[in-house]
Image (tube, grey):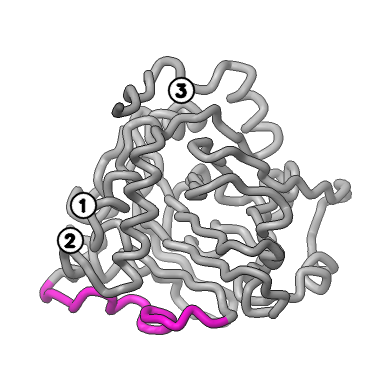
Amino acid sequence: MAQAAIDLAEALPSDEDVAFYREHGYYISKKILPDEVVDAAARGMERFYEGDHDAPMIERDQVVPSGWRPPAGFRPPIGTAMRKNDYASFQVKELGALVRYPAIGAVARRLTGSPSIRLWHDQLLYKPPIVEAAAAKVGWHTDRQYWMVASSDEMLTAWVAFHDVDETIGTITFVDGSHRWPLNRLDFFDPDLDALERRFETGGNAVVKVPAIMRRGQVSFHHCRLIHGSGANLSSEPRRAIAIHLQPEDNRHRHYEYAGGKVAAHHNDRLCRLVDGVPDYGDPRVCPRLA
């Protein structure tokens, strides 16, 4: 028997939940995804890795073959490295259905207080089992440090695992309240978590790490400035998840230069339509409204 759709009113965070998110920088939802949606997404993940795609990626002026971004780690064997594939939801319909499931956007809209929420982009994530290798860890980082071209400081990420998760399987882990610290520039790709922690600019605050322990169908949400990462998967099963990056209604492209003069950019700058020569982060083809 098909499971009933999730009631949006029941899925929304309470006032206390919203206050917790704003204070701590993360929120773990109730079960807001039906089993059949997660089941289908898990099958879609397998199809993605097999090269069985429903649509290619589309840039502004050309169609790019499916699986083009990123080329590394696209086909089996899985090996010992973590896989991260951007924009998978545009290439496999089951992943697209999960990313666009109404409850995810509705919760994000409630947490941010934004009139609407748009997709920023998504990342399909596969962490192989029983691997202590450095390549299977995610370094402490903030999402904001990679999104300096975006004007909003209130972007957020919904992280969805396709199964139950805990510390053993290498679940996402948050540094409590770190979204209120000075903006840390760390490194997603550096597996030396201890060395990265020594670089934290805490503003005098204690470092409290909180692993996201969730049942299937729950979703974790975290602020773009919150420090997060994950350790190795020491279980006997792969850790399978998707990160759904989200933007509030007022987010726009901005010109930003790092020290030394390097200009910030994002993949969306190549995908979104141009308006007066500037990428439009409201382009519904690339950044559809989710709530």
Looking at the image, can residue 157 be seen? no
Q: Amino acid at mark 2?
A: Arg
Which of pointers 2 and 1 lies earlier in the amino acid sequence?
2
Q: Residue drawn at (53%, 47%), measured in percent from left and top? A: 163
Spatial CA span between label 3 and label 2: 33 Å
Q: Which residue is tagged 2?
A: 273
Task: Single out the residue that lies furthest toward the front.
Answer: 1
Q: Is residue 234 above or below residue 167?
A: below
- On the image, the x and y values in percent for residue 263 come to 44, 75
* Residue 72 belongs to magenta span: yes
Q: Secondary structure at mark 3?
A: helix
Horizontally, residue 179 falls left or right of residue 125, namely: right
The answer to whether residue 137 is visible is yes
Question: In front: mark 3 or mark 2?
Answer: 3
Q: Secondary structure at mark 1?
A: loop
Q: Main secondary structure of the magenta part?
A: loop
Classify 10 Å Cα crowding around label 2: few (below 14), some (14-19), many (20 and above): many
| Stretch of the chain drawn in magenta | 61-79
Which residue shows up at 45% across the image and 55% down it? 242
Callout 1 amino acid? Asp
**Dots 2, 1 in contact, CB < 8 A:** yes
The part of the image, by quadrant, that contains residue 236 is bottom right
What residue is pinned by disc 1?
283
Reply above or below: 276 against 226. Answer: below
The vertical placement of 261 against 209, above or below, is below
The residue at 50%/58% (across/down) is 240
Q: Is residue 169 left or right of residue 61?
A: right
Question: Which part of the image, by quadrant, shows the N terminus?
Answer: top left
Estimate the x, y position of residue 42 in percent, counting from the top left.
39, 54
Amino acid type at circle 3 is: Ala
Which numbered marker is on residue 11? 3
Q: Is residue 155 left or right of residue 121?
A: right
